[in-house]
Image (cartoon, grey):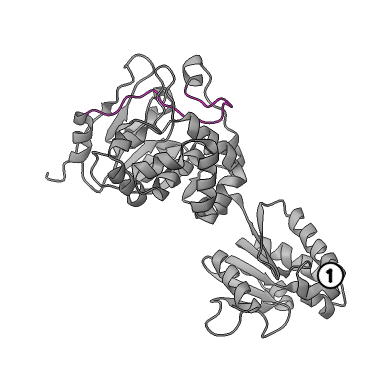
């Protein structure tokens, strides 16, 4: 590939939805037929335009400094306007350190610093992709990052990321050493009677489950195929869940799963070599991959009555089928109140784990089949139907 084709390749990797490219002069950028499916405007046109796009790409606007007699204000205006007008902003620029630009290195560096300063002033997370001759800044809201990996927040991302765990000696035994996520759960696996009742429900009914310490995994081996939505009020728990699910999806057999997760070093290496870049980027914006690996290793160990579900569990004994259901049946991860999720999906079977009943009392109005483990330790942590109205597909 030549330099133009390389730049196009990387830009297209990050374009999503309705796209617009902003150039400093007509017939510049990726305007040729078959290159980039986008609307095209020069800087002046764009600044006069009222628009909203999924992706906006600013194509080497440092070239417009000559057009604007060295004044960077128009470029800064374009960056500010673009950030307000899209969910993902791409800024393509020359790399001053590349050998082709050695005669203009100082000039290009000063221009790039102006652009970087403006990018930093946006206060949004961004990734810098460098493949040699060019650089690409990928700037997006955290909501967009989460959307891209199937996690959806009902409240502000910051609020749900900072939510504290419930206090109490029992709960603390299920949480990682840093007190960030549940790496264990205190529920035993569902009985065959529970699973049989779920399987008799209409196959179109959605299985909505609390994430917590990942006890939902043990429902998968014997449960018939149906749409699954996972929910948790805490964003950190949702992110850890996504990390675990991605690990399972990327390991085809239980032997692969165990060999790639023996320790933090091998686990981290596996993630960087095998995870999709957008998932790595999204997870790393919130929780470092190092910390997620630490949580996972802790989740392999039991602690009193609290069970780590990353080893020796029913879902692992039926690994291939569990993995298939994770890949094809889990529709999304909702960061929010499970009652709201059930309200939005009225035909559902809800597994509410051991969430205190006063926090979910309204769920009886939005779910016909509710599986609960009761308040620890009264029910011996065994799942039972708090409410049961099996609607058999056979009538």
User: Residue 190 appears in which quarter of the rendering?
Assistant: top left
Q: Is-magenta flag for residue 186?
A: yes
The span picked out in magenta is 174-191
User: Residue 184 appears in which quarter of the rendering?
Assistant: top left
> What secondary structure is marked by label 1?
helix
**Residue furthest toward the left?**
394
Split into 4 quadrants, where in the image is the C terminus?
top left
Count of number-bearing discs: 1
Q: Is-magenta flag for residue 1?
A: no
* Residue closer to the observer: 100 or 390: 100
Q: Which residue: 35% across, 41% down?
A: 254
Q: Which residue: 85% across, 65% down?
A: 110
Residue 143 in view in this figure: no
Q: Position of residue 328 (x, y in %)?
A: 33, 52
Q: Which residue: 47% across, 44% down?
A: 242
Q: Position of residue 186 (x, y in %)?
A: 39, 22
* Residue closer to the observer: 148 or 327: 327
Q: Position of residue 65 (x, y in %)?
A: 82, 75
Horizontal relation, residue 177 to residue 332: left or right: right
Q: Work out whether 112 lies above or below 293.
A: below
Q: Work out whether 147 lies above or below 72.
A: above
Q: Position of residue 66 (x, y in %)?
A: 84, 79
Q: Residues within 10 Å of mark 1 (few under 14, many from 20)?
A: some
* Residue closer to the observer: 212 or 390: 212
Residue 267 in view in this figure: yes
Horizontal relation, residue 314 to residue 359: left or right: left
User: Residue 372 appears in which quarter of the rendering?
Assistant: top left
Q: Which residue: 59% across, 27% down?
A: 178
Residue tagged 1: 105
**Prevailing secondary structure class for the magenta stretch in the rendered image:** loop
Split into 4 quadrants, where in the image is the N terminus?
bottom right
């Amino acid at each position: 590939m030549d330099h133009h084709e390389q730049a196009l390749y990387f830009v297209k990797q990050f374009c999503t939805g309705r796209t617009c490219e902003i150039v400093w002069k007509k017939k510049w950028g990726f305007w040729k037929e078959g290159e980039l499916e986008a609307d095209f405007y020069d800087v002046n046109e764009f600044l006069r335009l009222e628009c909203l796009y999924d992706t906006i790409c600013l194509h080497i606007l440092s070239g417009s400094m000559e057009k604007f007699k060295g004044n960077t204000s128009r470029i800064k205006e374009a960056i500010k306007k673009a950030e307000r007008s899209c969910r993902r902003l791409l800024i393509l620029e020359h790399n001053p350190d590349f050998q082709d630009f050695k005669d203009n290195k100082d000039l290009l560096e000063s221009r790039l610093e102006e652009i970087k300063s403006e990018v930093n002033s946006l206060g949004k997370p961004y990734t810098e992709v460098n493949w040699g001759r060019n650089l690409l800044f990928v700037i997006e809201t955290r909501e967009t990052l989460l959307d891209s990996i199937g996690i959806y927040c009902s409240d502000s991302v910051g609020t749900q990321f900072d939510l504290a765990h419930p206090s109490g000696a029992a709960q603390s035994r299920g949480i990682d050493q840093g007190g960030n996520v549940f790496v264990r759960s205190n529920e035993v696996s569902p009985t065959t009677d529970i699973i049989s009742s779920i399987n008799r429900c209409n196959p179109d009914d959605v299985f909505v489950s609390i994430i917590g310490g990942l006890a939902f995994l043990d429902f998968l081996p014997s449960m018939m195929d149906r749409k699954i939505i996972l929910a948790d009020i805490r964003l950190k728990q949702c992110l850890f869940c996504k990390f675990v699910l991605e690990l399972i999806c990327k390991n085809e057999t239980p032997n692969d799963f165990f060999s790639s997760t023996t320790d933090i070093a091998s686990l981290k290496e596996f993630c960087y070599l095998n995870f999709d870049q957008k998932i790595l980027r999204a997870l790393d914006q919130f929780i470092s991959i190092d910390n997620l690996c630490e949580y996972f290793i802790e989740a392999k160990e039991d602690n009193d009555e609290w069970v780590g579900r990353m080893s020796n569990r029913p879902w692992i004994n039926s690994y291939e089928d569990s993995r298939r259901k994770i890949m094809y049946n889990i529709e999304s991860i909702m960061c929010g109140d499970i009652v709201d999720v059930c309200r939005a999906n009225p035909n559902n079977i809800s597994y509410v784990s051991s969430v205190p009943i006063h926090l979910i009392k309204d769920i009886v109005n939005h779910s016909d089949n509710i599986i609960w483990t009761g308040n620890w330790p009264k029910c011996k942590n065994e799942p039972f139907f708090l409410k049961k109205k099996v609607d058999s597909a056979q009538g």
